[in-house]
Amino acid sequence: KYTNLLPKNLFLDVLAREIRSELVAECDYENEARFYKLFKHLFKDEKGIHVPDVVSELSTRRVLVTEYVDAITLREAAALSQSIRDSIGIRLLRLCLKELFVFKQMQTDPNPGNFFYQPKGDTLYLIDFGAGRSYKDTFVDDYLRVVHAASLRDWDRVYFYSTRLGFIDGTEHPDMLAAHCESVMAVGEPFRTDSEGGIFDFGRSGVKERMVELGPVMVKYRKRPPPPEIYSLHRKLAGCYLLCITLRARFASSRMFSDVFREYTFQEPDPFEAAGRPSPPLDIPARLRLMEMRKETSGEGAKANVVEGKIV
């Protein structure tokens, strides 16, 4: 509102409101203690996972006391054997998927300092639950469907569910629509079944680089802020991927996601099918190819072209 130093398409006012809300929650240690107890209950049957006990008699709204954790950081764990790193990565991603798609309650702060590993007991410790939040059934339904569509590289479904979630409305610049859908494809990359031997190698994946590459396009052309739930959710999901990348973990992440999708109970039949399987208003892969060609040549923007009746 008061400066032109940053593009208005960042929607910093919306982001600031989300950050303020989270900071208020982070500073309420009674609230955090409740989330500690909730997540301890949710993960009580998870092997190799431990949420420290809260010492209630010593905790207040301004002071939180928990069980002491004697363990190493995940950066230190990155020097351990491949099998141990894989095992930690499996637990991190399984936690992330179960939080969102099973419990619909998520600890949304993926700071590496919130996870510790105890080699002697092969235990992953989870701390800091100040940034916990819940998600509505309808939001989780559509988000699971868009990630599943990305895992299948189904452009039509990715576009359809992106509009339902409020990421886009279809009137944006073609580059924005294509970049958004490609960014969703990047989110779904670890869940594709075409990886070698069914194993996804986070250390050699290009997920992080692809997201960084697409970011400026979306910032330039974005017309609306993402749904409020997305700020914290994508921070957690991206943080989980980055932790797996740091660990150079390799495991069957597609099988893990497929199990979650198969066991999930949706609130309604597939809206995409009910809508008659609509197509996007543009040929997304063709537009992405055009964007790549522009980068390889002059770098100057090109006007939208029409191929087979679709904007590209």
Image (spheres, rainbow, N blue to C red):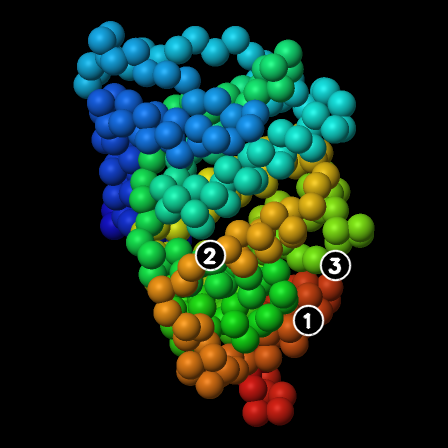
Q: Closer to the N terminus: mark 3 or mark 1?
A: 3
- x then y, percent, for residue 46: 51, 31
Q: Identity of the amino acid at label 1?
A: Arg
Of the residues tagged 3 and 1, which is closer to the observer? 3
Q: Is residue 65 above or below residue 304?
A: above
Q: Is 193 on the left-hand or right-hand side of 108? A: right
Q: Is 124 on the left-hand or right-hand side of 120? A: left
Disc assigned to residue 264: 2
Report the front residue among 75 and 56: 56
- x then y, percent, for residue 242: 59, 37
Q: Secondary structure at mark 3?
A: loop
The extreme front residue here reads 45
- x then y, percent, for residue 75: 62, 22
Report the front residue among 250 and 176: 250
Of the residues tagged 3 and 2, which is closer to the observer? 2
Q: How many numbered marks appear?
A: 3
Quadrant of res 22: top left
Of the residues tagged 1 and 2, which is closer to the observer? 2
Q: Which residue is found at the position 53% from the left and 52% from the top?
A: 260
Q: Which residue is found at the position 44% from the left and 28% from the top?
A: 44
For the C terminus, the image quarter is bottom right
Q: Secondary structure at mark 1?
A: helix
Question: Which residue lies under the disc numbered 1?
Answer: 289
Q: Closer to the N terminus: mark 3 or mark 2?
A: 3
Q: Identity of the amino acid at label 2?
A: Tyr
Disc assigned to residue 194: 3
Report the front residue among 18 and 157: 157
